[in-house]
Amino acid sequence: MHLNHLDLCVPDVPAAAAFFTRHFGFRELAMRGRGRLAVLEDGAGFVLVLSNLEQAGAFRYPEQFHVGFVLEDEAAVTAAYDDVRAGGAAIVHPLNRNRRGLMFYCACPGGIMVEVSARPPRDRA
Protein backbone atom coordinates (compact mmCIF):
# COMPACT_ATOMS: atom_id res chain seq x y z
CA MET A 1 0.00 0.00 0.00
CA HIS A 2 1.16 3.54 -0.70
CA LEU A 3 -0.32 6.98 -0.25
CA ASN A 4 -2.13 7.92 -3.45
CA HIS A 5 -3.05 11.55 -2.88
CA LEU A 6 -3.48 14.33 -0.38
CA ASP A 7 -6.13 17.05 -0.64
CA LEU A 8 -5.21 20.32 1.06
CA CYS A 9 -7.75 23.11 1.46
CA VAL A 10 -6.22 26.48 0.66
CA PRO A 11 -7.78 29.94 0.26
CA ASP A 12 -6.03 30.66 -3.09
CA VAL A 13 -5.73 27.50 -5.18
CA PRO A 14 -3.81 29.03 -8.14
CA ALA A 15 -1.23 30.66 -5.82
CA ALA A 16 -0.67 27.43 -3.86
CA ALA A 17 -0.42 25.44 -7.11
CA ALA A 18 2.18 27.87 -8.44
CA PHE A 19 4.15 27.51 -5.18
CA PHE A 20 4.27 23.70 -5.33
CA THR A 21 5.07 23.60 -9.05
CA ARG A 22 7.77 26.26 -8.86
CA HIS A 23 9.53 25.16 -5.69
CA PHE A 24 8.88 21.43 -5.39
CA GLY A 25 8.74 20.16 -8.95
CA PHE A 26 5.06 19.25 -9.12
CA ARG A 27 3.39 19.30 -12.52
CA GLU A 28 -0.11 20.69 -12.86
CA LEU A 29 -2.42 18.05 -14.33
CA ALA A 30 -5.64 20.06 -14.08
CA MET A 31 -7.09 23.32 -12.82
CA ARG A 32 -10.85 23.06 -12.48
CA GLY A 33 -13.85 25.00 -11.24
CA ARG A 34 -12.47 28.43 -12.13
CA GLY A 35 -9.41 27.94 -9.97
CA ARG A 36 -11.13 26.18 -7.08
CA LEU A 37 -9.42 22.81 -7.56
CA ALA A 38 -5.93 21.95 -8.79
CA VAL A 39 -4.51 18.48 -9.37
CA LEU A 40 -0.71 18.26 -9.22
CA GLU A 41 1.60 15.26 -9.69
CA ASP A 42 5.14 14.75 -8.42
CA GLY A 43 6.54 12.44 -11.11
CA ALA A 44 6.63 9.43 -8.77
CA GLY A 45 2.89 8.78 -8.76
CA PHE A 46 1.88 10.96 -5.83
CA VAL A 47 -0.99 13.39 -6.47
CA LEU A 48 -1.44 16.62 -4.53
CA VAL A 49 -4.91 18.12 -4.76
CA LEU A 50 -5.42 21.73 -3.72
CA SER A 51 -9.00 22.79 -3.23
CA ASN A 52 -11.33 25.53 -2.16
CA LEU A 53 -14.63 24.21 -3.45
CA GLU A 54 -16.74 26.30 -1.08
CA GLN A 55 -14.69 29.44 -1.79
CA ALA A 56 -13.88 29.85 1.89
CA GLY A 57 -11.65 32.78 2.80
CA ALA A 58 -9.42 31.08 5.37
CA PHE A 59 -8.67 27.61 6.65
CA ARG A 60 -7.26 26.77 10.04
CA TYR A 61 -5.10 23.71 10.35
CA PRO A 62 -3.77 22.56 13.73
CA GLU A 63 -0.71 24.57 14.79
CA GLN A 64 1.88 21.88 14.01
CA PHE A 65 0.22 20.57 10.83
CA HIS A 66 2.66 20.41 7.94
CA VAL A 67 3.64 18.49 4.84
CA GLY A 68 7.19 17.25 4.49
CA PHE A 69 9.60 16.70 1.62
CA VAL A 70 12.80 14.68 1.97
CA LEU A 71 15.44 15.70 -0.54
CA GLU A 72 18.40 13.66 -1.69
CA ASP A 73 21.10 15.54 0.20
CA GLU A 74 21.94 18.66 2.16
CA ALA A 75 22.98 20.57 -0.95
CA ALA A 76 19.46 20.09 -2.33
CA VAL A 77 17.97 21.36 0.94
CA THR A 78 20.17 24.46 0.84
CA ALA A 79 19.21 25.07 -2.80
CA ALA A 80 15.50 24.68 -1.97
CA TYR A 81 15.90 27.10 0.94
CA ASP A 82 17.54 29.70 -1.29
CA ASP A 83 14.84 29.16 -3.93
CA VAL A 84 11.84 29.61 -1.63
CA ARG A 85 13.44 32.65 0.01
CA ALA A 86 14.13 34.21 -3.39
CA GLY A 87 10.53 33.47 -4.35
CA GLY A 88 9.25 35.40 -1.36
CA ALA A 89 7.88 32.48 0.65
CA ALA A 90 7.57 33.01 4.38
CA ILE A 91 10.31 31.17 6.27
CA VAL A 92 8.82 29.70 9.45
CA HIS A 93 12.11 28.19 10.73
CA PRO A 94 15.41 28.85 8.91
CA LEU A 95 17.96 26.20 7.99
CA ASN A 96 18.76 24.11 11.02
CA ARG A 97 20.84 21.00 11.57
CA ASN A 98 19.68 18.56 14.23
CA ARG A 99 19.75 14.81 14.84
CA ARG A 100 17.26 14.38 11.98
CA GLY A 101 19.49 16.20 9.48
CA LEU A 102 19.44 19.57 7.75
CA MET A 103 15.98 21.12 7.48
CA PHE A 104 13.87 24.23 7.26
CA TYR A 105 10.19 25.13 7.37
CA CYS A 106 8.41 27.57 5.10
CA ALA A 107 4.77 28.44 4.46
CA CYS A 108 2.96 28.08 1.17
CA PRO A 109 0.34 30.65 0.19
CA GLY A 110 -2.54 30.10 2.58
CA GLY A 111 -0.23 29.32 5.47
CA ILE A 112 0.29 25.56 5.24
CA MET A 113 3.67 24.80 6.76
CA VAL A 114 6.13 22.84 4.60
CA GLU A 115 9.12 20.96 6.02
CA VAL A 116 12.10 20.36 3.74
CA SER A 117 14.89 18.09 4.95
CA ALA A 118 17.65 15.67 4.08
CA ARG A 119 18.33 12.75 6.35
CA PRO A 120 21.82 12.29 7.70
CA PRO A 121 23.83 9.81 5.57
CA ARG A 122 23.61 7.06 8.24
CA ASP A 123 19.78 7.11 8.08
CA ARG A 124 19.56 6.47 4.34
CA ALA A 125 18.90 2.91 3.38
Image (spheres, rainbow, N blue to C red):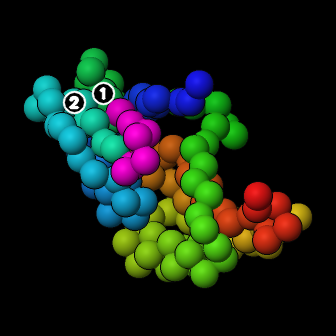
Q: Is residue 105 left or right of residue 82?
A: right
Give residue 125's position: percent from left, percent from top: 76, 58
Residue furthest toward the right? 99
Q: Which residue shows up at 24% across the image and 30% down it? A: 37
The residue at which mark 1 appears reads as: 52
Residue furthest toward the top? 54
- Between the C-alphas of marks 2 and 1, the distance is 5 Å
- Mark 1 and mark 2 in contact (Cβ < 8 Å)? yes
Compared to residue 92, the image places residue 15 above or below, namely above
Q: Quadrant of the N terminus?
A: top right
Give residue 62's position: percent from left, percent from top: 64, 31
Give residue 63's position: percent from left, percent from top: 67, 37
Magenta residues? Answer: 42-49
* Residue 48 is covered by the magenta coloring: yes
Residue 67 in view = yes
Q: Is residue 37 left or right of residue 49?
A: left
Under mark 2, the amino acid is Arg
**Mark 2 crowd level (few <14, some 14–19, many ≥20, 10 Å Cα):** some
Q: Which residue shows up at 42% across the image and 60% down it? A: 24
Q: What is the number of the mark on residue 36?
A: 2
Question: How many tags in the picture?
Answer: 2
* Residue 4 is covered by the magenta coloring: no
Under mark 1, the amino acid is Asn
Predominant secondary structure in magenta? loop
**Mark 1 crowd level (few <14, some 14–19, many ≥20, 10 Å Cα):** many
Q: Mark 1 falls on what kind of element?
A: loop
- Mark closer to the chain start, 2 or 1: 2
